[in-house]
Amino acid sequence: MRTRPLGRSGIDVSVVTLGSMNFGKDLDEREGVELVAAYLDHGGNFLDTADCYADGLSETIVGAARRRLGDRFAICTKTGRPMFDDERQSGYAPQRLRNALEASLRRLGVDHVEMYQLHQWDPAVPVEDAVETLAALRDEGKIGAFGIGNVPAWALGQAYGFCRGRAIAGADAYQYHYSLGCRDAEAEILPACVAHGAGLMAWSPLSGGLLTGKYATQPGASGPRRGDKPVGRRGYGFERLADGWPAICESLRLVADRTGTSMTAVALSWLLSRPGVVTAVIGARSPAQLAETIGTPLPELGPEYLAALTENAPAVTPYPQDFLTQVLPGWDLMAVTRREAVG
């Protein structure tokens, strides 16, 4: 499996990251370790977890995998969301961040993690304060690098500006929802990644499995489905995907047939072709399901295939991007982003 540098962290991560949100919930320790071993056999080297996943059990299982399988993979863990349904165990107050990291290190059984991330927005704590604490933890050697996820783009700008003003290294990774089925991140987040030198870790890169071809695209078609419409969790763009999903899947199927690969591989390849994207964070319930997802080599898609996929998955264009496309003929945000990435 190919690797890419994660921002300026000095860490080279595989283009597919194994997410462990289901560790401790759907998978016990033995099953989780077996899944990690299978992922390593496929050439992966980066695991994503969080302290809130199964209230810490996910980190414990990832730690067990590290002990049994060695340091063949880097670890990214996150904090900021409540644990044990207790809002007091969340947020980014400086001492809370330090305590959370120490607890994560104990569960993981390590003295440092390669990547530590803010899991979501905390409006009660200025992002500059949180970033200052993360930079101090990095200087102390407890984390190799830090990242930010699920916050407004302007907060990413605040964090970046704060670090530049202090002449310290900023975030090396931003983790956001992004896929062919939900392209909202193209409006602000991907340009921020490129401008700030941070790599995007894209979660739900297959739109909750809806881009794999496992679900029927029309009533009466064979194959499993999620009710009458392929709608997953609320609030992540899945509602909009319900209407455009058949066309997106059909374009994926056509490209997969012409390139002799799977719809999953095509969807991941499209994602990894986007400027700023470094790795796709996937989950799996078993080694067999993991093999279905990453067992097929990812194809190098030509521009005609990439364009066809993009055209069949129109993005939501908010203001002021829609305004700029009208007043600046030929202006294209992603084209500008690509030029910045190359430059």
Image (cartoon, grey):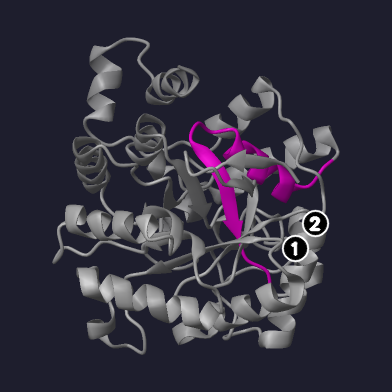
Q: Nearer the viewer, residue 109 or 234?
A: 109
Tell me the element at label 2: loop
Residue that carries the numbered disc 2 in the rendered image: 42
Instruction: Kindly indicate whether the residue at mark 2 contacts the one at mark 1 (C-beta within 8 angstroms).
Output: yes
Q: Which of 149/256 is in front?
A: 149
| Rendered residue at 22%/48% (across/down) | 155
- Quarter occupied by residue 61: bottom right
- As measured in the structure, the alpha-carbon distance from the residue carrying label 1 to the one carrying label 2 is 5 Å
The boundaries of the magenta stretch are 261-284
Identify the residue under disc 1. Answer: 39
Q: Is residue 160 visible?
A: yes
| Element assignment for label 1 | helix
Q: Is residue 250 left or right of residue 94?
A: right
Q: Quadrant of residue 312?
A: top right
Between residue 29 and residue 27, name the one nearer to us: 29
Disc number for residue 292? none
